[in-house]
Amino acid sequence: MTLDGKIAASTGHAWWISSKKSRSLVFELRARSDAIIVGGNTVRRDNPRLTARHGGGHMPMRIVMSQSLDLPEEANLWDMSE
């Protein structure tokens, strides 16, 4: 984490702040969850997939909280192929 409390530099460059083991645990938790909720800025800046990835076929509902609804058309969020 940077001194200003952010996990990415002002240039947008970011890096993992968690271990491979903890990321794996997150995907397991997602597989048991009904929904994954993020803010609009997370979609615009990080372009997440919001999937369980190895959750045995369960796909949690993906929810985005946004005041402006100006989400990018090319966001990974819209790709339902995973």
Image: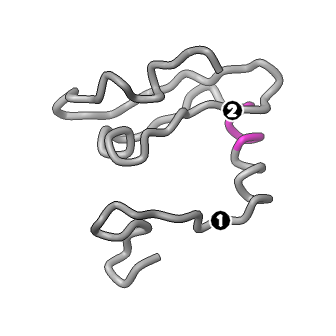
Q: Residue furthest bottom?
A: 3
Report the magenta residues as a range.
Answer: 27-31
Which SS type dominates the magenta stretch?
A: helix
**The residue under label 1 is which amino acid type?**
Ser
Q: Which mark, residue 42?
A: none
Residue plotted at (72% across, 65% down): 19
Tag 1, which secondary structure?
A: loop
Q: Amino acid at mark 2?
A: Ala
Query: What percent of the width, then of the height, locates residue 26?
Result: 70, 47
- How far apart in space, not on screen, are marks 1 and 2 (Cα)? 17 Å
Find the residue positioned furthest to the top.
81
Q: Which residue is mark 2?
A: 52
Task: Tell me the quarter of the image containing the C terminus.
Answer: top right
Are dots 1 and 2 in contact, CB under 8 Å? no
Q: In the visual, does 20 lie left or right of 44?
A: right
- Residue identified by numbered label 1: 18
Image-based side of 52 in relation to 36, left or right: right
Q: Is residue 29 magenta?
A: yes
The residue at 61%/15% (across/down) is 81
Q: Position of residue 56 (x, y in %)?
A: 83, 23
The location of residue 44, given as percent across then percent down, is 32, 41
Q: Position of residue 46 (x, y in %)?
A: 42, 47
Secondary structure of residue under mark 2: loop
